[in-house]
Image (cartoon, rainbow, N blue to C red):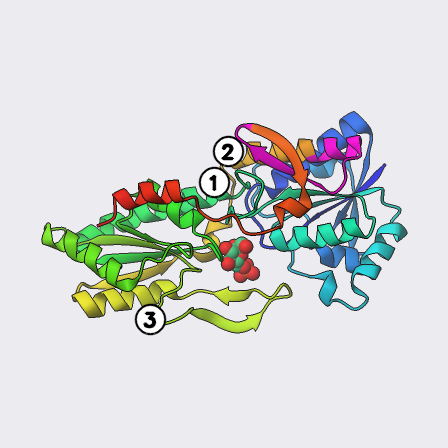
């Protein structure tokens, strides 16, 4: 059997762990051949690929990024679109396609599955917002990086009696903000799912000041909407999947706090630092489990399915279920975070 493998969308730590597991089990147990499609869907559209040997699946477990490259190419926006993708799949004599990606990349996988392509999905994103799975790999690494940053900002905030506003990634959901905020002891966490406005923020910081605490840590997800100002966006241009580039909400929040409370405030945008570098042990293990499960699903012929973490077990769900909607932060966890606000 000849299998195509691709990684699409924003990269995330743990992608190479998945690739390694797919390749190693695929070659050693099932005798599969692999083609690595370069840069996500762009590789399939342009027939840009590499025939992978066993040695290509070695020495990559600890590496961040993806050895296959990634992009936000969307076949729907390309000349010939899905027809070309189907034609190229046939041209390459592929028997199956393993697609490692977030909601955008997996929604393309679903469309190709509906057109008869045997596809298996593996959910990835630091945002942890994919449905039908408890966790995506990359999230744990992002939370660790953000937590370390918050710890560092704590000491300087305290020394200078400042309010530090930390902007973390999370386009539609506040998973990273909530988890890193809890782990880092944030005084307020602002996420897209919760209607916590500027007046609430001011009240909480004021409460701290009344207690003699003249520093605060505010964690804000990039997708948080400040009612008074609307979305803060870096550019109105959209990527191929219609996503606007976010960024700058932290600065708005910091300026507002300084204006209303007279407390010196600074914003720090963690940005792509959260996506780079070596994956945590947790993400390497989850990535490895997903990779093994994906190639097993190919072997069982269970196409149109996506690997999923349910509790501590790896299961399979339909890709359709996975891309249905964004998985938002659960109320229970946010309520825990709120206990420590102010
Ligand atoms: O989807 C993952 C993500 O890291 C989001 O949190 C963020 O908004 C986006 O990607 C950034 O995308 P890009 O790397 O294209 O700027």
Q: Name the residue tied to disc 1.
A: 140
Numbered label attached to residue 76? none
**Sequence-wise first label, 2 or 1:** 1
- Image side of residue 243 versus residue 92, left or right: left
Occupied quadrant, residue 48: bottom right
Image depth: mark 3 or mark 1 in front = 3
Q: Can residue 58 be seen in this view?
A: no
- Image side of residue 153 versus residue 279, left or right: left
Q: Tell me if residue 106 comes above or below residue 135 in the rendering.
A: below
Q: Distance between the residues labelled 2 and 3?
A: 39 Å
**For numbered disc 3, what is the local secondary structure?**
loop
Q: Distance between the residues labelled 3 and 1?
A: 32 Å
Is residue 300 a member of the stretch shown in magenta? yes
- Give coordinates of residue 315: x percent, y percent: 63, 32
Numbered label attached to residue 228? 3
Numbered label attached to residue 282? 2
Assess whether mark 1 and mark 2 are in contact (beta carbons under 8 angstroms): yes
Occupied quadrant, residue 5: top right
Instruction: Specify the segment rendered in magenta.
Output: 294-312
């Amino acid at each position: 059997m000849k299998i195509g493998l691709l990684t699409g969308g924003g990269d995330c730590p743990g992608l190479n762990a998945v690739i390694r597991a797919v390749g190693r089990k695929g070659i050693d147990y099932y005798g599969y051949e692999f083609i690595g499609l370069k840069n996500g869907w762009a590789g399939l559209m342009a027939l840009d690929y590499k025939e992978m040997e066993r040695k290509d699946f070695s020495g990559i477990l600890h590496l961040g990024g993806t050895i296959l490259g990634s992009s936000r190419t969307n076949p729907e926006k390309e000349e010939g679109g899905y027809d070309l993708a189907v034609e190229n799949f046939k041209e390459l004599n592929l028997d199956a396609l393993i697609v490692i990606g977030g909601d955008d990349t997996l929604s393309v996988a679903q469309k190709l599955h509906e057109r008869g392509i045997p596809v298996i999905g593996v959910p990835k994103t630091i945002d942890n917002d994919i449905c039908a799975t408890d966790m995506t790999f990359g999230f744990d690494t992002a939370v660790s990086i953000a937590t370390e940053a918050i710890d560092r900002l704590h000491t300087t905030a305290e020394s200078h009696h400042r309010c530090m506003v930390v902007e973390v990634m999370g386009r539609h959901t506040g998973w990273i903000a909530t988890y890193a905020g809890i782990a880092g002891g944030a005084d307020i966490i602002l996420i897209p799912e919760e209607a916590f406005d500027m007046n609430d923020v001011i009240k909480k910081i004021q409460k701290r000041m009344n207690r003699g605490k003249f520093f605060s840590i505010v964690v804000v997800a990039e997708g948080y909407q400040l009612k008074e100002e609307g979305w803060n966006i870096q550019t109105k241009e959209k990527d191929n999947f219609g996503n606007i580039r976010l960024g700058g909400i932290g600065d708005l929040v910091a300026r507002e706090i300084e204006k209303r409370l007279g407390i010196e405030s600074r914003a720090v945008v963690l940005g792509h630092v959260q996506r780079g570098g070596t994956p945590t042990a947790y993400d390497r293990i989850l990535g490895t489990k997903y990779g093994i499960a994906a190639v097993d699903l190919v072997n069982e012929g269970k196409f149109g399915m996506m690997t999923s973490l349910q509790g501590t077990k790896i299961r399979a769900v339909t890709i359709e279920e996975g891309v249905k909607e964004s998985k938002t932060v659960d109320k229970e966890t946010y309520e825990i975070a709120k206990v420590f606000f102010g």
